[in-house]
Image (cartoon, rainbow, N blue to C red):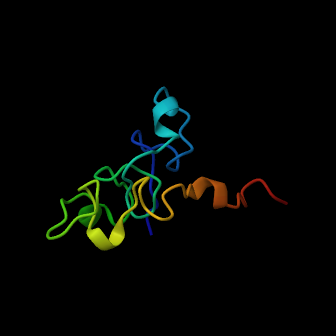
Amino acid sequence: AQQAKCSCGEKSALHCTCSKASTENSVSGPRCSCRARPAGQCTCERASTENTKPAGETCACGVRPADACTCDKAVDGSYNPSEHETDFTTRR
């Protein structure tokens, strides 16, 4: 499965090292369902569904479906996926 990448496509989302790193490595407001990219800018295998405007009722921010809110107003809105990752590439 393709995982979310930063907008330059070089690194995993939230781990960008290019000139856009200062904006790429932090996400606030509405996010895609993996919460690693802003809503509407998903780059993982769900991009085709994530980057469309939801039909029907939306959450308070109006960007996500009402039952799938991922903005700062969500119950778990402060969840940061990079804080819960285990980097197995540097472990021996």
Q: Position of residue 4 (x, y in %)?
A: 44, 56
Q: Quadrant of residue 58 in the image? A: bottom left
* Relative horizontal placement of residue 33, taking residue 66 as reference (left or right): right
Check the picture and name the quadrant holding the C terminus: bottom right
Check the picture and name the quadrant holding the N terminus: bottom left
User: Which residue lies most toward the left here?
Assistant: 55
Q: How many marks?
A: 0
User: Which residue lies most toward the top here?
Assistant: 19
Q: Quadrant of residue 33 in the image? A: bottom left
On screen, 33 above or below 5? below
Q: Position of residue 91 (x, y in %)?
A: 81, 58
Q: Residue at x 41, y 39 (%)?
A: 8
Q: Residue at x 48, y 58 (%)?
A: 77
* Relative horizontal placement of residue 76, taking residue 38 as reference (left or right): right
User: Which residue lies most toward the bottom here?
Assistant: 67
Q: Position of residue 68 (x, y in %)?
A: 35, 69
